[in-house]
């Protein structure tokens, strides 16, 4: 294993025709870190990790992945990384054993080594069904865990997971994140994309992307403090929303963000004084409770807010 960061990216860019999918992105990832990419569909998350996994050649900029670059077309990088795409990567019409044998064949792994790794990974994911089980017969969460095992057969240093829990049940999502933490506990580095805000809370740091550019980077708490330096309150109108009050508060000095959350609204202010002044007009029967911002609030402010 090479010393230094697991990933070091400087000015990474790629275009498809006249469309810039990733635009001058720079960041680094520490070894053993869970590093997340958060952004709307089309933000450039998947394209970025496909470049870093050696599957796409960048148009400009540089990247070192496990200390390796793209001088050989990314062939060296492919040997030290595992990649699990957002689309299910196992074949439903094959057995579990056939799928893993196929994955081992693609990696040109020695059969004895592949069998050893399979045993280790089955223990990691607590898989105890027969190898003859058809993949099509397995629940979605177990399929995803097996796809993770297939991506890790060659014992990679760095694991890229592209929306690995998309479409699976909440309990299975929680279990998958336990596996991610186990993987980093083994010394691996994990880079994961997700559109679930609660999942992103599990990342050590998050790169927030919008239209191909990196617009914020930091731990979940750092992103919250940066986006919302002042207080936040949750407004509950106890019934019909008071549109007149909302119209008035939208023009209040010091208001940073006002957004709906179900039947309630979150209002963020520059400081306590501006919040108190704005809330003097709160209609009778309504309530305002102080709350801490979530990553969903950060996303609304930094991504959706800029679009508005």
Image: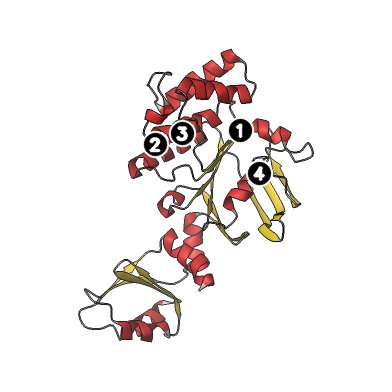
Whichever of callouts 3 and 2 sits on the residue coming sooner in the sequence is 2
Q: Nearer the viewer, residue 90 or 232?
A: 90
Mark 4 surroundings within 10 Å by alpha-carbon count, few (fewer than 14), some (14 through 19), many (20 or more): many
Q: Are marks 3 and 1 in contact (CB under 8 Å)?
A: no
Q: For the residue labelled by badge 1, is the local secondary structure a helix, a strand or a loop? A: loop
Whichever of callouts 4 and 1 sits on the residue coming sooner in the sequence is 4
Mark 3 surroundings within 10 Å by alpha-carbon count, few (fewer than 14), some (14 through 19), many (20 or more): some
Spatial CA distance of label 3 from label 1 is: 14 Å
Residue drawn at 76 percent across, 38 percent down:
73
Q: Which residue is mark 1?
A: 157
Residue drawn at 65 percent across, 52 percent down:
27
Q: Position of residue 68 (x, y in %)?
A: 73, 38
Q: Residue furthest left?
A: 285
Residue 123's disc is none
The vertical placement of 146 against 197, above or below, is above
In this view of the protein, can residue 1 be seen by the observer?
no
Q: Which residue is mark 4?
A: 52
Q: Position of residue 283 (x, y in %)?
A: 25, 83
Q: Nearer the viewer's eye, disc 4 or disc 1?
A: 4
Q: Which residue is mark 3?
A: 182
């Amino acid at each position: 294993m090479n010393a230094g960061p697991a990933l070091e990216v400087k000015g990474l860019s790629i275009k498809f025709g006249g469309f810039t999918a990733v635009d001058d992105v720079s960041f680094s990832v520490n070894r053993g870190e869970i590093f997340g990419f958060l952004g709307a569909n089309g933000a450039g998350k998947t394209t970025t990790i496909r470049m870093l996994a050696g599957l796409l050649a960048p148009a400009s900029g540089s990247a070192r992945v496990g200390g390796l670059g793209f001088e050989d077309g990314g062939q060296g990088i492919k040997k030290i990384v595992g990649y699990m795409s957002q689309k299910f990567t196992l074949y439903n019409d094959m057995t579990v054993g056939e799928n893993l044998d196929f994955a081992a064949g693609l990696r040109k792994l020695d059969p004895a080594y592949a069998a050893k790794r399979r045993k280790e990974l089955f223990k990691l994911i607590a898989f105890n069904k027969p190898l003859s089980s058809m993949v099509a017969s397995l629940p979605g969460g177990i399929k995803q865990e097996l796809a993770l095992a297939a991506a890790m057969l060659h014992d990679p240093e760095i694991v890229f997971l592209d929306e690995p829990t998309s479409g699976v049940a909440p309990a299975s999502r929680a279990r998958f994140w336990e596996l991610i933490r186990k993987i980093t506990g083994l010394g691996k580095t994990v880079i994961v994309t997700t559109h679930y805000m609660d999942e992103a809370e599990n990342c050590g740091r998050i790169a927030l992307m919008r239209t191909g550019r990196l617009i914020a980077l930091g731990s979940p708490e750092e992103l919250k403090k940066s986006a919302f330096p002042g207080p936040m309150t949750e407004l509950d109108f106890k019934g019909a929303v008071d549109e007149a009050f909302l119209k008035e508060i939208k023009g209040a000095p010091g208001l940073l963000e006002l957004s709906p959350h179900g039947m309630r609204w979150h209002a963020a202010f520059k400081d306590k004084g501006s919040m108190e002044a704005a809330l003097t007009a709160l209609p009778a029967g309504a309530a305002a409770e102080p709350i801490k911002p979530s990553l969903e609030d950060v996303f609304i402010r930094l991504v959706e807010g800029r679009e508005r």
